[in-house]
Amino acid sequence: MRKLVAAICSLMILIPFAAPTAQAESPNFPPEIELPDGYFPEGIAVGRGSTFYVGSISEGSVYRGDLRTGQGAVLTDPFGAFTTIGIDVDQRNRVWVAGGPSGTARVYDGDTGDLLQVYALTAPFSSFINDVIVTEDAAWFTDSGTQNSPDPGGFVFAGTPRIFEIPLGPGGALPDAGEIEEIAVAVDDLTFPNLNGIETAPWSGELLVNHTTAGAVFGVDTVTGAASEVYSGELDGADGMSRRGRTLYVVDNATAEIDEIRLDPSSSTGTLIRSLPVTGSETPTTSALFGSAIYAVDARFGSMTGPYKVFRVDL
C-alpha cells in the first residue's frame, strides 16, 4: 500500500475531490479473472457460494463476479475517486467498504448493490481508512494515516495508528453513526501506511493487524488497544490479510507474494511456513480464501494501468 501515496497524488490531479510453489490449473475455476478496463482494484472479498467482490479505487464502485465462471459486472453505483479500498462481506451478505482518504465506511447489499449506510469515521483527507474485517458483533476498520505529507501541498493523513469499531445491534442491525468507537493502538507511528490489513485472531479478545512500514503483524486488544508483536520477518509491503484456522496469509505487495504464517495460540506468535508467488501480478494488495485456493487482486500500483486481474493461487 505504500505505493498508493504516489498513486493518489498523481491521479487526484486528474480526478476531483520461501520457495516458489506451482500454481496448478483447475478445470472448473480459471487461474486469472479479468476486471473491467480501468477499474483500478484494491480490495477483494468472497461472499456466498463462489461469489466474489472487488472494489475500485478509481471511482468507488463494487464489482461482483463468480470465481467458477470468471464472469461478473459492476454491482454498485460509483461513490467517488479513492473512496473504496479494503472490503469484507458479513454473514448477512452485506459488503463493507473502507473509504480511504474520504474517511468513510460504507455498507452495501451484496445482492442488489443498494447503499445501506454511510459512516463518517473521520473528516475527509484527515486519515486513510484502509481495511475492514466484520465479526458477528462489529465491523473493524484500520486507519493507516500519519502526520507526514508526501510532498509540499500534498495530502496530510493525520490519523495515528488506530482502529474504528462499528458495533452491530441485535440480529446484526446497523447502528447509528454516534455509536462508533475509536481505539488507539499502541504501536509506533512511523510513516504512511501505518496499520493496514486486519483479521480476527484464533485466540479470544484480539484482532490481528499488520503495520506496513514496520513490517510486522500485531495482536491488538479490542478494548484497550494494547499491542504485542505476533510476527516480524519476511514482510515487504504487508497489505491485506486472510486467515483460516491457525494459518494467516499476508499479501506482500512489494514482492508480489503471499506469506503463509502458522499461528501458535499458546504463545500468540507466528512462524513463516512459505511464501507463495502471485505469478503474473504486479502489485497484489488483498486476498480472499475459497476452497483450496487463495485469490489476490492486482492493483498494479507500479504502472497504474491495466489489465487488472484477480489471480488464483493454489494452496
Image (cartoon, rainbow, N blue to C red):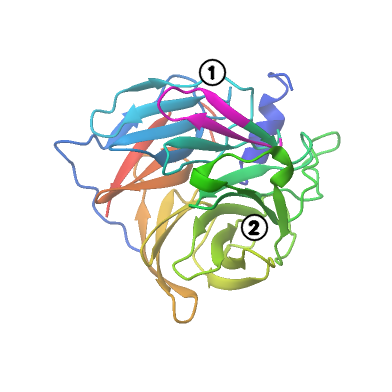
**Within the magenta stretch, is there residue 115?**
yes
- Residue at 49% x, 59% y is 200
The residue closer to the viewer here, 193 or 275, is 193
Pick whichever of labels 2 and 1 is earlier in the sequence: 1
15 lies above or below 109: above
Task: Answer yes or no: is residue 237 visible.
Answer: no
Q: Which residue is mark 1?
A: 77
Quarter of the image where the C terminus is located:
bottom left
- Residue at 48% x, 52% y is 136
**Within the magenta stretch, is there residue 120?**
no
220 lies above or below 147: below
Quarter of the image where the N terminus is located:
top right
Q: Would residue 60 appear left or right of 189 to someone viewing this image?
A: left
Give residue 156's position: percent from left, percent from top: 80, 41
Q: Secondary structure at mark 1?
A: loop
Residue 213: which numbered mark, if any? 2
206 lies above or below 167: below
Q: Would residue 74 appear left or right of 185 to someone viewing this image?
A: left
Give residue 72's position: percent from left, percent from top: 34, 23
- Residue at 57% x, 59% y is 210
Task: Answer yes or no: is residue 290 visible.
Answer: yes
Residue 216: which numbered mark, if any? none
In this view, the mark in front (2 or 1): 1
Magenta segment range? 103-117
- Residue at 77% x, 35% y is 125
The crowd level at tag 2 (other Cα within 10 Å; few <14, some 14-19, many 20+) is many
The amino acid type found where label 2 is placed reads: Thr
Q: Residue furthest front?
A: 170
Task: Identify the image quadrant of residue 152.
Answer: top right
